[in-house]
Amino acid sequence: MERKVEFHCHEVTVRFLERAVVPPYEGSMIRGAFGRAFKESCCPFPHENGSGCPLGDKCPYGYVFETSPPGELRGFSKNRELPRPYVFEPPENTKMEYARGERMTFGFTVVGRAAEFMPYFVFAFSKMGETGVGRLRARYELERIVATKPLSGERAEVFDGEVVRNRSLPTRWEDAVEAARGMEAERSGVEFLTPTFVKYRGRVQPKAPAFAALVQSLLIRLPMLSAVHCGEAWEGDFRSLVARAGEIRTVRDHTSWVSFRRHSSFKNRTEALEGVVGEARYSGATGEFLPLLKLGEISHVGKRAVFGLGRYRLLP
């Protein structure tokens, strides 16, 4: 099964110039500050009453934050459920406070043609540092950005603090297939690193998501990312795949439900960032699903992936 999709993963490192106090879930802070800085960097038009940018997808901000389906895919209809072409990953070691001179590293992944806007993204990250982040609006210096291929370990420097380099290490479907080779095909372990909110058969999965729930959610998210941002719709009998995934059992569930609150200044309301974290083990013929799950480690799964939710990793 050959699938077209392309992810460009990056590690972003900043050094704080003053003491910073951050929220319990740093992903919300990073995403919020980035949205403001990115708009100020590249879009001069007001976005009032949900009108969106008059330039549409010709505007980097309009494309990245107000994604519309391409002309040949108008059947999707313009709606807020279209996946945005980026994912943030907050630092793995959560901290509430950073001292002056301390560094913070977070992940930033862009999908398909959004990679064309990398110079805008670098400028926005730098502008975030000038404006300040967190409760104290702490300023930072953008120190380094490195392109990575998480499934193979390759790395290339994109920004060294002064110069932006045109370096790209795209992760594609075939990379996931290669990464899945030699993995255990009769059982799988999954560690949910950030809150994972998955629905299955119309119901939220309040404990470890059923294996079929993970597969179904990925078979919704990844084909839409491909269709909207990579120019190709996936084809296949997804219903049969989900049915086969339904034969795989959950044999261990060491997960718990967590919830964070964030205030959206754009919407002027408080929202929940919630889902399960922890470890689950599944038993059954998981082999055919491993490339999909490996790619899902990068795309994330479920709701609010742009904030870094739904991040997981497969366990040995």
Image (cartoon, rainbow, N blue to C red):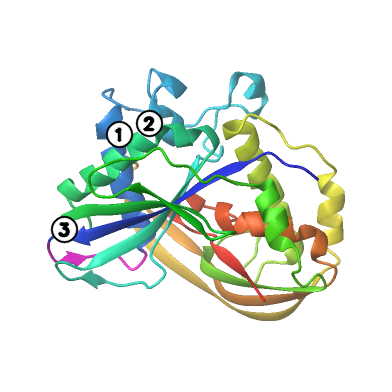
Q: Which mark is residue 39?
A: 1
Residue 218 coordinates in the image, percent (x, y): 67, 52
| Amino acid type for the residue under numbered disc 3 | Ala
Residue 97 coordinates in the image, percent (x, y): 23, 71
Label 1: how many residues lie within 10 Å, few (<14), some (14-19) or many (20+)? many
Q: Is residue 296 above or below residue 114?
A: below
As for residue 116 lying within the magenta part, the answer is: no
Give the magenta part as a residue range: 18-25
Mark 2 and 1 residues: CB-CB less than 8 Å, in contact? yes
Q: Which mark is residue 65?
A: none
For numbered disc 1, what is the local secondary structure? helix
From the image, tell me which residue sits under label 2: 61
**On the rendered image, what quadrant is the N terminus found in?**
top right
Label 3: how many residues lie within 10 Å, few (<14), some (14-19) or many (20+)? many
**Gap between marks 3 and 1, in whole Å?**
20 Å
Give whichever of discs 3 and 2 has the lower sequence position: 2
From the image, tell me which residue sits under label 3: 138
At 27% across and 71% down in the image, what residue appears? Answer: 96
Q: Is residue 167 above or below residue 98?
A: above
**On the rendered image, what quadrant is the C terminus found in?**
bottom right
| Amino acid type for the residue under numbered disc 1 | Lys
Res 74 → quadrant: top right
Label 2: how many residues lie within 10 Å, few (<14), some (14-19) or many (20+)? many
Is 21 displayed left or right of 35 in the figure? left
Is 173 displayed left or right of 286 in the figure? left
Is 134 displayed left or right of 287 in the figure? left
Residue 299 coordinates in the image, percent (x, y): 57, 51
At 52% across and 32% down in the image, what residue appears? Answer: 113
Give whichever of discs 3 and 1 has the lower sequence position: 1
For numbered disc 3, what is the local secondary structure? loop
| Amino acid type for the residue under numbered disc 2 | Tyr
**Gap between marks 2 and 1, in whole Å?**
6 Å
